[in-house]
């Protein structure tokens, strides 16, 4: 039972959970993150199985607040705009934002997840437990049941 207000449990080590663990870790909370799957950084099946996603300004702000914006954008591909193909065959480019570098950035989901998990584990006060599945939670009492 977690009665200590400085202790936080995060369920799921995807993009949101691992980012959340970074936020909480940064604020000095004692965080335990439970992820039902195995560690994607070690799992050869998971490696390479990733759909790229696009990071917009909102995502950049979140990454910046945990000091990861530059790291992530360093390996991302800027997508300045879209190219429209007219019926006549004419091409027209449409920028996502008139301000240069305010574009969206394409990055592999797993790469982003890896950066976030690495960053979370870099906090001494954050522990990540893979192969642990949440099976029950009593939020009011602060009791959870996790299955290995
Ligand atoms: C095809 C596709 C394309 C997308 N493209 C974009 C895009 O371009 N840009 C963008 O911003 N967003 C995009 N999204 C949305 C984005 O993927 C989600 O917003 C994001 O993944 C949500 O993060 P999450 O951590 O909540 O969920 P997830 O990334 O799904 O992570 C949830 C984690 O929780 C774990 N879990 C689940 N149940 C349990 C349990 N009982 N116990 C322990 N662990 C558990 C899972 O194993 C998983 O690792 C896309 C989504 C899809 C499907």
Image (cartoon, rainbow, N blue to C red):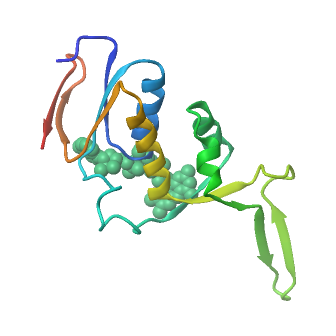
In the rendering, at what x and y percent does residue 54 appear? 60, 57
Q: Is residue 3 left or right of residue 54?
A: left
* Residue 110 appears left or right of 33: right
Q: Is residue 16 visible?
A: no
Residue 80 location, quadrant: bottom right
Residue 24: x, y in percent? 43, 25
User: Residue 104: x, y in percent?
Assistant: 69, 55
User: Eyeballing the image, is 136 above or below 90?
Assistant: above
Count the labels in the image. Answer: 0
Near-viewer residue (84 or 23): 23
Tell me if residue 100 can be seen. Answer: yes
Q: Residue at x 30, y 66 (%)?
A: 44
Residue drawn at (19%, 43%), measured in percent from left and top?
A: 133
Q: Is residue 44 left or right of residue 94?
A: left
20 relative position to 128: left or right: right
Q: Specify the farthest residue to the bottom.
A: 88
Quarter of the image where the N terminus is located: top left
Q: Image quadrant for the C terminus? A: top left
Q: Position of residue 5 (x, y in %)?
A: 32, 11
Q: Determine the residue located farthest toward the top in the rendered image.
A: 4
Residue at 46% over, 38% down: 119
Query: Residue 22 appears in which quarter of the rendering?
Result: top left
């Amino acid at each position: 039972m977690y009665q200590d207000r400085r202790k936080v449990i995060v369920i799921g080590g995807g993009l949101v959970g691992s980012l959340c663990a970074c936020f909480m870790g940064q604020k000095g909370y004692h965080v335990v993150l439970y992820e039902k799957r195995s560690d994607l950084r070690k799992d050869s099946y998971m490696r390479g199985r990733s759909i790229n996603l696009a990071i917009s300004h909102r995502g950049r702000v979140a990454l910046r607040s945990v000091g990861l914006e530059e790291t992530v954008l360093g390996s991302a591909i800027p997508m300045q705009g879209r190219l429209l193909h007219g019926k006549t065959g004419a091409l027209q480019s449409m920028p996502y934002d008139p301000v240069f570098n305010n574009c969206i950035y394409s990055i592999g989901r797993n790469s982003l997840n890896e950066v976030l998990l690495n960053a979370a584990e870099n906090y001494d006060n954050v522990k990540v437990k893979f192969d642990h599945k949440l099976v029950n939670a009593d939020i009011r009492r602060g009791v959870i049941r996790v299955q290995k």
